[in-house]
Amino acid sequence: MDKELYIIRHGETDYNKLGIVQGRGVNTDLNALGRKQGEAFYQYYKHIPFDKVYTSALKRTHQTVNRFIEDGISWEQLPGLDELSFGIWEGKESKEDWVNAFREMNTNWQRGQCDLSFEKGESPNQVSRRLQEALDVILSRPSEKRVLVCMHGRSLLVLLCMLSQSPISCMTSFAHSNTCLYRVSVVNGQFSILEANDIRHLANS
């Protein structure tokens, strides 16, 4: 195995809890449950000898894996791992106008129209390009055999399509929840998803 990636979504924020649209332009903190989820993940996986921690540039990812960083594991922020920008909808409550707009956009994305974006936002294809840049950085360090990556819900779905060589339009075929784990092996440049949406670390939290 060339490399093993432990890819997790950040813990819960109040925006997650309240259903407020949260994208790349919203830099929220974890709430009490989110911090508890991060601690539960740490306690379950602290025995894993990670060589590196990668996060997005948004603090909810840093906070989720902070205990690993405090342990002295090398940490790097890659803005390419940031959440998709939902543009003018960011910071707004999930009311009927947003629900309708998102349903329509999601339908378009599922039909393969992945160059479409919300006003002043990003398309999934734009996100995939910056994710590829971040992934190239991670894969360029052969000495880092086992790495922990903390990112965001929608950008995680785009990345999973990329790793599984699925069209970006298949985003919704993957499940995800706060601090869920996708464990991925890399062998000769080929990716295999070994564990998907794993939340066993939350069983006792």
Image (cartoon, grey):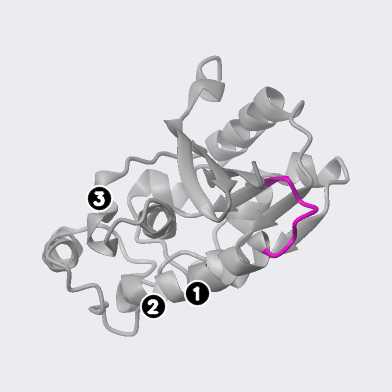
* Vertical placement of residue 46 versus 20, above or below: above
Q: Which residue is mark 3?
A: 172
Residue 76 left/right relative to 16: right
Residue closest to the far front? 188
The chief SS type of the magenta part is loop
Q: Which residue is mark 1?
A: 130
Camera-nearest residue between 135 and 90: 135
Is any atom of residue 65 visible in this view?
Answer: yes
Q: Residue 157: x and y, percent?
A: 37, 53
- Label 2: which secondary element: helix
Label 3 CA crowd tier, 10 Å (few <14, some 14–19, many 20+): some
**Distance from label 2 to label 1 (Cα)?**
7 Å
- Label 1: which secondary element: helix
Identify the residue at horizontal 52%, vertical 38% (top origin): 179
Instruction: Evaluate if marks 2 and 1 touch, with contact meaning CB atoms under 8 Å apart.
Output: yes
Q: Amino acid at mark 3?
A: Thr
Camera-nearest residue between 120 and 146: 146
Q: Which residues are magenta?
A: 140-147
Identify the residue at horizontal 63%, vertical 66% (top origin): 57
> Which is more N-terminal, label 2 or label 3?
2
> Which is more N-terminal, label 3 or label 1?
1
Does the magenta portion include 141?
yes
Can you tell which quarter of the image residue 101 is in? Answer: bottom left
Q: Amino acid at mark 1?
A: Arg
Which quarter of the image is occupied by the C terminus? top right
Residue 88 left/right relative to 50: left
Badge number at residue 126: 2
Identify the residue at horizontal 38%, vertical 41% (top origin): 176
Residue 165 left/right relative to 188: left
Does the magenta portion include 15?
no
